[in-house]
Amino acid sequence: MQSSQFKPFSVVSRYLAAQFLGIFFPVLCGLVLLYIVIDVADRMSIFLRHSATVGEAARYMLFKVPLMLTQIMPPAVVISVLMSLGLLARRNEIIALRASGISLLQTTLPILALALAISMAALVWNETVVPYSSRMFQFVNNVEIRERGMRGIFRDREIWYHGGRGFYSIDYVDRVRQTVHGLLIYRLGSIESGFHLEGVIEIPRAQWRDGRWTFATDSLRHTARGDSFDTTPLDTSAFDMPETISDFLEVQREPEELSYTALRQRIATLTAKGIDASHYLVDLHLKLALPFANSVLALVSIPLAGRLRRHPSIAAIVGLGAAVGFGYWVLLGLATSLGTSGAIPPALAAWSANGIYTLLAVAFFLYSE
């Protein structure tokens, strides 16, 4: 039998694309609603403890939806691929296409093209909408709901914090090592003196250990003397800060609050100042790798869908999709941990899950043919 010529924009291609999209959008909305219900139930005690209004809780969830979409999209793609191909198999349409000489890969090219388009859209979404919305739901949580006050401001290259010792300028807060790097404390005078600068305390590194701060031995105190400053070593045994490491961590933006460009600039700035920013390198590569999880998971789900029974149940489809997604995230989590610890390069840690699942997809396709 002569193989049929498969055209990318044929009636069959448009039909398959419509079949996938007709399932993808309801599944995506359903998973987001489920995510919202679970998150609201998890945070209900916080809302009640801080007497949050309905408007505050609604704004918190509304600003969190873009991040939810990013996290929910890969499993939505997997389930949609399995369900759309499962319905085609139930109506014997896959068999008809295969009998006409069209391979499984050719049959599912429209779905793969849509998955790639979803990946590109997710990449743009993560660079534009997610950083802003993440900052906003953190603001609603800390300022409006918890009423902690706007004590810190994160600029492009540093953190400004209004603390008990004055105004703090911070280069970087290391969550893992519980360390503050590049700390400058500006001590101002009273209102009567016009808030003139009385002195600056320069602390290259301060570590939170056993409930108290320990400071670098090369810390300095600059005391104003008219138009000049007297510089003396800081007596670290007699100096302390009332803030804890948690206070500074609250005002530092997490990687999801920064775009790829902003995070790359942050790494470059910290590195230029001699601060180890290797912890951020994995997050930087993940910003490019994670959106393409949609394409990779779609690619590996297509041959698996061909292994389903002729009349697959919804439970079987969801179960298979959960197994595929769970395996991916376990592999990604393991690789990320190895990359963060320095055992493997950051780029390899971020892209290894995509690479391994792509190889599995190629093997499954070869086996299915």
Image (tube, rainbow, N blue to C red):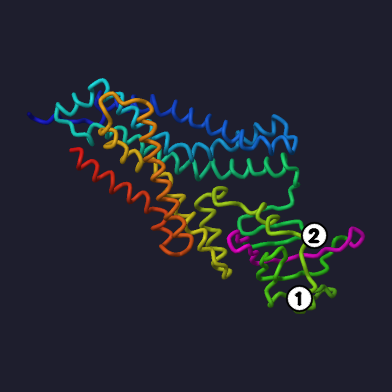
- The answer to whether residue 122 is above or below residue 182 is above
Q: Residue at x 41, y 56 (%)?
A: 349
Residue at far top of view? 91
The image shows a total of numbered marks equal to 2
Q: What segment is highlighted magenta in the picture?
A: 173-193
Left/right of residue 303 with respect to residue 139 in the rendered view? left
Residue 164, label in figure: 2
45 or 102, which is in the foreground?
45
Q: Is 192 in the magenta? A: yes
Q: Residue at x 35, y 30 (%)?
A: 316
Q: Quadrant of residue 320?
A: top left
Q: Quadrant of residue 249?
A: bottom right
Query: Residue 31 placed where, x, y %?
Result: 48, 31
Q: Secondary structure at mark 2?
A: loop
333 or 60, which is in the foreground?
333
- The answer to whether residue 63 is above or below residue 20 is below
Left/right of residue 197 with respect to residue 344 in the rendered view? right
